[in-house]
Amino acid sequence: MTEVMTIGEPMVNLIADSDQTYMEARTLPTQMAGAEFNVAIGVRRQGHTVSYVTTLGNDWQGDMIVDYMTNAGIDTANIRRSNEAATGSQLKVVLPDGDPKVIYFRKGSAASRTTPDIVDGIDFSGLKILHVSGVFAALAENTYETIERLVNAARVHGALVTFDPNPRPTLWPSEEEMIAATNKLAAKCDVFMPGLSEGQMFSGRENARDVADFYLDMGVKQVIIKLGASGSALFSRNADGERVETVVPSFVVDVVDTVGAGDGFASGAITALLEGLPAERLLERANAVGAIQVTNVSDSEGLPTREQLESFIANTPRKEVSL
């Protein structure tokens, strides 16, 4: 029994020294990566239980990932192992401007071969939130179908479904297909969490309020929009059908690595939803976790504990934000 469940492709993350090219590097620190994996770590560090659904190869990378998850307290009961394909991995080359170059080794990976029947063996008892992202949905037709079945099953069992579109255009046959598939999935979810530019692309609207209305009109209960580095906004509708909005600024930090910021944001939002926090506190926490994450090179190892998060919120200056 876990509070949160997610599905995705966890990968071994090799990081080249920032002062060398990856061809020159003699040592490659090994960490973990993957959008949904980062979210799971963030949720766990906030003191909540989380389980992970995926397929890994029967190889050293798969063993390393399972061991890491187990040591982190993530439930691995819903992870399949396969002899037919390898576990995916990636190489990150850190650049001075904070935007790293990432080289993937994941084509035809075990995770990309996950099929919808993996959902049939899942115990949904006690599940409160299912979190999905557009990354796993984009890997293959079978992974998209797997997410659809998992979302449907979670809703039947009364769980809230959160969705970060996290677009990967190169994984789709066309942008049109990506947009259609993403919006089809968003309509099945309760909370949709795009960045502003993502929301503009998927909805065809420009203003954040209009983007929110597009998804509220299709039945999404809450639309949480990341407004770049400045902050975020949450939109919902009251009993009279009127739009309600909350806008909260982010924090002033020195950026080291931008990868994982959105995943950290998602983990903050998810734990706030679990705890029933009001919109302003939810956005404050989500902004804080995302801000902390960009001060670290690792995709997830910098994600804060509850004590670290509370100290950061209390002692870090805020930015200014507006819609």
Image (cartoon, rainbow, N blue to C red):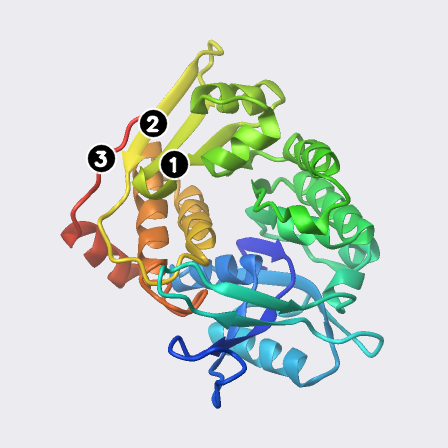
Q: Compared with residue 131, is residue 63 higher up or lower down, i.e. above or below?
A: below
Quadrant location of the N terminus in the rendered image: bottom right
Sort mark 2 into few (<14), some (14-19) or many (20+) by Cα contacts within 10 Å: some
The residue lying at 82 percent from left, 79 percent from top is 83
Residue wearing tag 2: 246
Q: Amino acid at mark 1?
A: Leu
- Relative to residue 144, is residue 278 depicted above or below? above
Going by the numbered disc 3, the residue's amino acid type is Glu
253 or 312: nearer the eye? 253
* Mark 2 vs mark 3: in front: 3
Position in image of residue 247 (x %, y %): 32, 30
Question: Which residue is located at x 58 percent, y 48 percent?
Answer: 131
- Residue drawn at the location 48% of the way across and 85% of the way down: 25
Crowd class of label 1 (few under 14; some 14 to 19; many from 20; radius 10 Å): many
Using residue 8 as the reference point, say whether residue 47 is left or right of it. left
Q: Find disc 1 in the rendering and name its residue.
A: 227
Q: Which residue is mark 3?
A: 320
Q: Earlier in the sequence, mark 1 or mark 2?
A: 1
**Up-down relation of residue 151 to residue 323 (above or below):** below
Kind of residue sitting beneath label 2: Thr
Q: CA distance from mark 1 to mark 2?
A: 12 Å
Q: Quadrant of residue 12?
A: bottom right
Alpha carbons under labels 2 and 3: distance apart: 14 Å
Residue in front for this viewpoint, 172 or 298: 172
